[in-house]
Amino acid sequence: MLYNIHPLKLFRALSLSLELSHDGSARHHWRTAMIASRIAEELPIEDSERQLVLHASLLHDIGAAAHWDEEFVGDGAFEGAAQHAEAGYRLLKDSRALGRLALPIRYHHARWDGMGAAEPAGKAIPLAARIIHAANRMETLLAEEKREHVLLQQRPILKTLASEAGKELDPAVVAVLLQIAEKESFWLDLINYQYYDRFFSLRMEGHMHLQLAEILDIAEIFATLIDQASQFTARHSRFVSQVAALLAEKKGFCQMEVTAMRIAGLLHDLGKLSIPAHVLEKEGKLAPEEQTIMRQHTYYTYRILSELDDFPLISQWAAYHHETLDGEGYPFRVPGEQLRLGSRIVAVADVFVALTEPRPYRPKLLTRHQVEEIMQERAAKNKLDDGLVKLLFQHYREACAGMHKWENGDAENEGKNGAMPS
């Protein structure tokens, strides 16, 4: 099993997750990237700088994705722009794979005139950030007026951008944008979803591809983002990844496959960014209609990861964790005989971690015996793989290692009161 992922392909796919809870059909990040890339291609800068602009544009709102409901208010205006830009910077700054995107993302809302914020101003703002700011502003104006035909929006939007040059936006960047936006084709490309694939395929620069370790690093960042969406899942994705990797090792997966399993575990709940906060944060069991909404998350995990045609196994391992051996799982109702071992592993790991975590609807932590009993019952009903459940509890202490502190302080207490980790 080989992984030969182009970074642009990965960033383009993962950018879809950043707007799921706001408007997953808007393609805000893709359109911002298209505008920013067109600006960068007209400037006398290195190819590496153009590449930076394109990649950072695709992820520019990563700091807001877990809390879109808080970022957008009433009329759709952005609040807390500096806060989400700073949050994005903190997520990325120490990343080996994405650290270079941190500064452009940090300052993509910095004003050219420096008013109203203790940020750099003018040419002290990184050029990539200035380009993304202008592109983001144009795309936002376009989105706000989307009821009108796009060509009828051209003049009002360009007038607004011209008025903001030298104040909010870099006048040199705006000048370039105004020039390229004179073409009707520029605007029609932005609303033509069929053109998007061609736009990105033409920019698959060079033969640079991500190593599996770099993909793992990126998956760690998105796991943090996913788990931030709810106060009850602070490290859920990492623990599922840990348990799934352990089971994969015990089943004889090679090291590359174990790393791929770690990635699948980290990204298995990527689609949860589509779930409204009031559902994720509900302090009690979900009502039937809320459960129905929750079921969409695995669908979006699959659709996002399946954008990566080099990622077929990881997308299935990650997204099929609520499919069941009796074929009655969701969202695809995959027959049990078609469920790969990797998907069964992530399903077992996800149930195990969920049962051992504190949850608002469970006043007390479950004991090891209770967790094992529940999982064995599900296996008996052909919901979980019985062999994997048995394997998990044969290596129970390894599975729990590093996951939680024991309820009363250390592992010795398990023999005294049977408490699961808290």
Image (cartoon, rainbow, N blue to C red):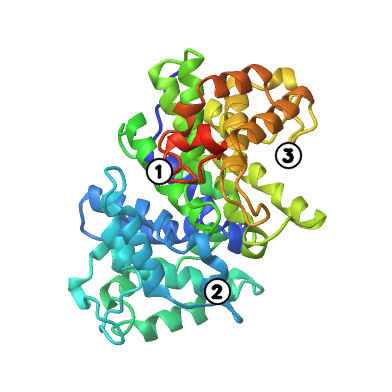
- Choose top left, top right, bottom left or bottom right for residue 72: bottom right
The reply to whether the C-beta atoms of the residues labelled 1 and 3 are less than 8 Å apart is no
- Please name which of the two marks, 1 or 2, marks the residue nearer to the observer: 1
| SS state under label 2 | strand
In which quadrant of the rendered view does residue 257 lie?
top left
Q: Which mark is nearer the camera, 1 or 3?
A: 1
Q: Given the image, on which type of amino acid does mark 2 rest?
A: Phe
Kindly identify which numbered label has been placed on residue 72. Answer: 2
Q: Which numbered disc, 1 or 3, marks the residue that appears first in the sequence? A: 1
Real-space Cα separation, disc 1 to disc 2, in angstroms? 26 Å
The quadrant of the image that shows the N terminus is top left
Q: Is residue 43 above or below residue 355?
A: below
Task: Give the amino acid at mark 3.
Answer: Pro
Q: CA distance from mark 1 to mark 3?
A: 25 Å
State the mark number for residue 331: 3
Question: Which secondary structure lies at badge 1?
Answer: helix
Earlier-in-chain disc, 3 versus 2? 2
Considering only vertical position in the picture, is 250 above or below 267?
above
Q: Residue at x 39, y 27 (%)?
A: 4
Q: Image point 62% across, 71% down: which residue? A: 146
Task: Mark yes or no: residue 203 visible.
Answer: no
Neighbours of disc 3 within 10 Å: few (<14), some (14-19), many (20+): some
Q: Earlier in the sequence, mark 1 or mark 2?
A: 2
**Residue 288 rendering spot, x and y as whole percentages:** 81, 54
Q: Dot 3: what SS?
A: loop
Instruction: Name the foreground residue: 234 vs 340.
Output: 234
Give the labeled residue for mark 1: 220
- The correct choice, above or below, for 113 with respect to 87 in the image is below
